[in-house]
Image: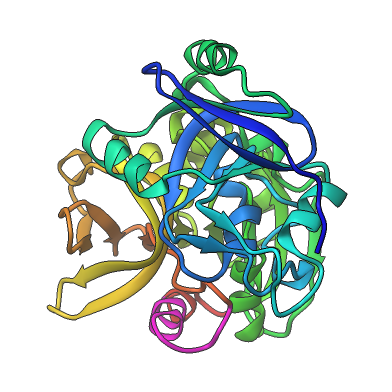
Amino acid sequence: MWYKIMKAVLGLEDGTIITGTGFGVEGSASGELVVTLVSTGYMEALSDPSVSGQLLMFGYPLVGNYGANKDQLQHEKVHAAGTIVRELCVHPKHQPTLGEFFEDNGLIGIEGVDTRMLTIKLREQGVMRAALITGSDDGYKAVSMAQTAPVQETRELIPGVTCKAPYHIEGKGKKIAVLDLGCRKSILTSLKNRGADIYVYPYGTPADVIMAEKPSALFLTNGPGYPFAAPKAISCVKDILGTIPVHGICMGTEIIAAALGGQVEKLRLGHRGASQPVKFSDGTVAVTFQGHGYAVVGDSLPEGCEVNCINANDGTVEGFVNNDLGVYCVQFHPEHDGIYDGVEKPIYDIMYRGIPDA
């Protein structure tokens, strides 16, 4: 299968220059370089709003082996600013190819990169800014772009991925207000599977507007960037805490922690992929899908909060509860594919059972 062959270069803020073959269209992008370790689910990873403004590198060596299926997108479009792979499959089992999908949708990527070397580099030195240029191999320009790119903590990314207006997904069950910080569609699928009556609100919606609908709980979704760069969400949660249960996933967990007066820490490499082990307070361990670069600092949470699960690899916080306030949140994505099994069922069942009937 033919697709356009062109020059491409990746430049890192530390001066590293890596040339390869471009795919998609000619263009450039800069942002934080992060790595995901998924071996399948590349369409989901690319379209996760949590990677907005980032260059996404796949640690698995072959990407695109089952083509590009739009039904697997977790949002309306691809949100990764650029894509880095070791090898792009040009003869997948299904059509179109990922390369064709990138070209048709104005996306940029580079292949032929030693992703193993880069993953080790990021693991040792931490995530860093990078720039990708397709249609050129000007490495010095790429490095300059990387060095002048804004740091993640200064970027307000959620307004670019939240819904534009409130909307309603009718259900016969409990009424849940969802604050969309860049919601994966699988989150809404898990809530719909339980019959929830869902009211979705865009970022920036004041608490009084949400509470006017008299929801039985507030649910905060995943989203991109740094939680303290989303002050409107923090303010909204502060105003609602203690009146109805508040639940969160991923960024939602960090926003809730911030509203309670807690802090977050930046992870050296981040937790991205489908093989992150989470250890719960009862001693059980689950293998989970994750996609975050920050974690809540457990010691910063106020009295009444209890850390109930940690990452088994590095001990960072993966979730906490506050029974007095009706708070239950996890940093990982139990719903991942919206499949009613694995960690999806126990986690979402706990959250749903904790919501009072209307």
Which colour scheme appears in the figure?
A: rainbow
> In terms of depth relative to the viewer, which is nearer, 18 or 301?
18
In this rendering, does residue 241 appear at all?
Answer: no
> Is 139 on the left or on the right of 164, as rendered?
left
Residue 95 falls inside the magenta stretch: no
The percent position of residue 321, horizontal first and vertical second, equals 29, 61
Residue at x 35% of width, y 49% of height: 116
Q: Quadrant of the C terminus?
A: bottom right
Judge whether 189 appears above or below 21 on screen.
below
Residue at x 31% of width, y 75% of height: 287
Total number of numbered discs in the rendering:
0
Judge whether 335 appears above or below 98 on screen.
below
The percent position of residue 169, horizontal first and vertical second, equals 78, 71
The percent position of residue 274, horizontal first and vertical second, equals 41, 68
Furthest residue toward bottom: 341
Residue 343 falls inside the magenta stretch: yes
Q: Report the magenta residues as a range.
A: 338-350
> Is 214 on the left or on the right of 277, as rendered?
right
> Is 155 on the left or on the right of 341, as rendered?
right
Residue at x 18% of width, y 81% of height: 284
The percent position of residue 315, horizontal first and vertical second, equals 15, 55
> In terms of depth relative to the viewer, which is nearer, 87 or 285?
87
User: Residue 114 is drawn in which quadrant?
Assistant: top left
User: Residue 75 is drawn in which quadrant?
Assistant: bottom right
Q: Quadrant of the N terminus?
A: bottom right
> In terms of depth relative to the viewer, which is nearer, 278 or 22?
22
> In terms of depth relative to the viewer, which is nearer, 222 or 60?
60
